[in-house]
Image (cartoon, helix red, strand yellow):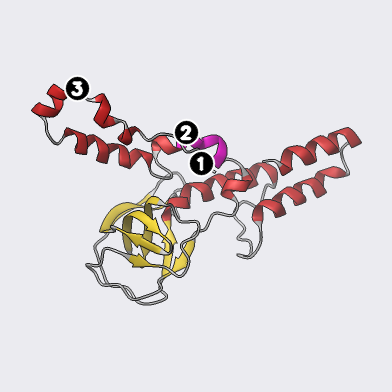
Amino acid sequence: MPKNTVKIRHLLGSQLASYIKDEFPLIDEFFSQYYNGLDFQGGTLDLINNIDSYLKLSENANAVSESKLAADITDTQNFIDLFNADGFPDQFGIIQIDDEIIVYEVKLGNRLLFCRRGFTGVSSLDRSNNSEELTFNETSADSHKFQTPVKNLSVLFLQEFLKRVKGQLLPGLQTEKLTDNLNQAQFIRHLVIYILQEELSLPLKFYLRHYIMTR
């Protein structure tokens, strides 16, 4: 799991000199919002602080990529109810419903609160004709119906990490979609062990098993 580090935005109030606050009353809010854009799951600072965790199969192999709406929502509604919000970020998550991208500030149970509708953001980490380019969309607020799929865009980077790990351990499998009910982390670990165990000496087998099972 990501480390529970102190967020930079929480320290700003005590770090800025009083004369700066007096001269620029909104500077606290400005920097707070700026660092919100770096601290969210998948953001620059989050990746720097947690890259070692995110590269582990236990973190990226079973990321939750989708849920469904538990009720209709209007184009002005600032909260969204899901059937199951497990796996969605607790704070500052990014989702996509139909063509609309939405940012929410807080998750409370299965409800996403303080939603900013019609957001502009990345909906895919590659284009069909160029895997090195992001798909960046400008969207507008719209109404959505009960049981419409809700994509968890906050885990796009975890899915990309998983592709890279699968490409290293099991070349050719990185683009294959496995069944949703499968524990991918366990499957990949045991498959790698099965493939290699006949080719290794006994001490190396024990080492390999310990290493893979703890990743």
Q: Is residue 201 visible?
A: no
**Is label 3 in a helix, a strand or a loop?**
loop
Determine the residue positioned at 28% across, 57% down. Answer: 114
**In the rendered structure, does residue 52 fall within the stretch colored magenta?**
yes
Q: Is residue 190 visible?
A: yes
Could you tell me how far apart the alpha carbons at marks 2 and 1 are, in whole angstroms?
A: 8 Å
Specify the quadrant that holds the C terminus. Answer: top right
Q: Which residue is mark 3?
A: 17
Q: Which residue is mark 1?
A: 2
| Of the two numbered discs 2 and 3 in the rendering, the one whose residue sits closer to the viewer | 3
> What crowding class fits label 2: few (fewer than 14 Cα within 10 Å), some (14-19), or many (20 or more)?
some
Horizontal and vertical percent for residue 77?
A: 25, 67
Label 2 vs 3, first from the N-terminus: 3
Residue 181's mark?
none
Residue extent of the magenta highlight = 47-54
Label 1 vs 3, first from the N-terminus: 1
Q: Which residue is mark 2?
A: 49
Q: Are marks 2 and 1 in contact (CB under 8 Å)?
A: yes
Rendered image quadrant of residue 152: bottom left
Q: Give the left or right position of residue 89, taking residue 201 as reference.
A: left
